[in-house]
């Protein structure tokens, strides 16, 4: 553990040197305003819906933060809150995570306005909410199923990686993966580790380097998703329900203990390292280089839309 801490401290120093000029001193503050990327805080109360069915033991958590279920701080807190609420009901053994946006987008990942020209007082709290969401979902006592009906890039992919089982719509336009390198950022170590654990070291290494977004068929081949459903087929919900029922048939104590076997170490690692992880993130994301690349990425997204 002490080796890990000192290596991380070294990495922080390295990033500080690479970043050289911190964001608060940066000319990026004067960059042109990107009108379609201007929202920051939003209301906590209508971002997700939790539907619990004590009869079946299954709860369904639907995300509906328009337009793309991107993860603002409030959105992450709402998802965490809903997971904890489902867990507090002893009749509930399984949770289906899905999107109810008409576009079908599962989640577009972290809300980019939280990262670009960030509110410096909010930034550490934003990251802590991301860590907490990972801990709540990855470490949940519930069996968790991601029902992915649309794109799931970056932190959207993290949501699905944190579940026990992933079902995806077989539509080549719906892609999934950790594409952070394309934005000039990298996945934090705990997220990269999830990727390695699920798709294997070599697949993860290449995909992280290239920022690969996998089509559903490719995702199935590398094991990033477990099952595909024909595009336009409404049975993705039924399949998720069926899978949930299958998990529920396993005695809960054994199921939870089995999960702990594979996830316990990573959860303990981040739990004991949250402050440092947050400090690293804040100093990294506010460097001029990262801000510049994020700005260009946002411009590219806006242009692509036009
Ligand atoms: C301790 C170590 C630390 C190391 C440092 C760590 C650095 C941080 C790394 C953290 C890991 C996670 C990172 C992320 O999640 S970053 C976010 C990455 N997300 C993306 O790249 C996705 C971008 N979006 C898209 O590709 C498409 O929008 C998508 C495929 C999702 C949907 O396409 P579609 O064509 O259907 O829809 P639009 O593109 O028109 O989008 C609809 C509207 O949604 C807005 N949008 C999309 N994505 C985001 C986003 N992530 N944040 C904010 N807003 C987003 C888009 O602008 C459209 O809005 P308008 O309709 O208002 O124009």
Image (cartoon, grey):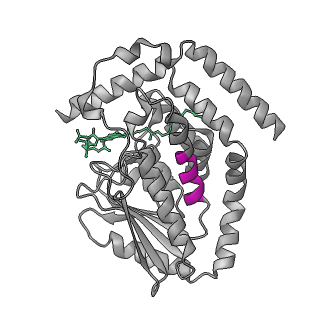
On the question of residue 82 being in view, the answer is: yes
Residues rendered magenta in the picture: 129-138
Residue visible at 47% across and 64% down?
82
Residue visible at 24% across and 54% down?
103
Q: Nearer the viewer, residue 196 or 142?
A: 142
The residue at the far right in this view is 2
The reply, left or right, for residue 216 in relation to residue 66 is right
Q: Nearer the viewer, residue 84 or 218?
A: 84
Q: Position of residue 132 (x, y in %)?
A: 57, 51
The picture quadrant for ligand 1 comes to: top left
Q: Position of residue 33 (x, y in %)?
A: 28, 23
Q: Position of residue 235 (x, y in %)?
A: 31, 73
Residue visible at 52% across and 78% down?
92
Say which quarter of the image contains residue 47: bottom left
Most frequent secondary structure within the magenta stretch: helix
Q: Nearer the viewer, residue 267 or 116?
A: 116
> Is the N terminus in the top left, top right, bottom left or bottom right quadrant?
top right
- Work out whether 24 lies above or below 232: above
- Work out whether 162 lies above or below 27: below
- Work out whether 82 lies above or below 238: above
């Amino acid at each position: 553990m002490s080796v890990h801490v000192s290596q991380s401290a070294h990495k922080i120093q390295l990033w500080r040197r690479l970043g050289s000029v911190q964001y608060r001193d940066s000319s990026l503050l004067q960059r042109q305003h990107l009108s379609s990327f201007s929202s920051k805080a939003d209301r906590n109360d209508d971002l997700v819906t939790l539907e619990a069915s004590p009869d079946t033991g299954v709860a369904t958590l639907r995300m509906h933060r328009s337009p793309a279920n991107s993860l603002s701080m409030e959105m992450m807190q709402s998802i965490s809150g809903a997971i904890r609420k489902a867990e507090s009901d002893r009749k509930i053994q399984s949770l289906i995570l899905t999107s109810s946006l008409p576009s079908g987008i599962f989640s577009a990942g972290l809300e980019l306005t939280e990262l670009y020209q960030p509110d410096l007082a909010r930034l550490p709290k934003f990251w802590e909410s991301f860590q907490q969401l990972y801990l709540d979902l990855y470490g949940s006592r519930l069996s968790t199923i991601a029902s992915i009906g649309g794109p799931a890039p970056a932190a959207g992919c993290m949501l699905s990686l944190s579940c026990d089982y992933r079902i995806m719509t077989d539509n080549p336009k719906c892609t999934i993966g950790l594409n952070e390198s394309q934005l000039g950022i990298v996945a934090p170590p705990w997220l990269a580790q999830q990727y390695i654990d699920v798709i294997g070291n070599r697949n993860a290494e290449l995909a992280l380097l290239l920022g690969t977004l996998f089509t559903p068929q490719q995702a199935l081949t590398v094991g990033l998703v477990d099952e595909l459903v024909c595009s336009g087929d409404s049975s993705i919900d039924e399949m998720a329900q069926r899978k949930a029922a299958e998990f529920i048939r396993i005695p809960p104590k054994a199921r939870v203990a089995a999960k702990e076997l594979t996830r316990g170490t990573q959860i303990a690692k981040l739990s004991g390292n949250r402050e440092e992880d947050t400090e690293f993130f804040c100093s990294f994301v506010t460097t001029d280089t990262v801000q510049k690349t994020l700005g260009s990425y946002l411009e590219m997204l806006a242009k692509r839309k036009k």
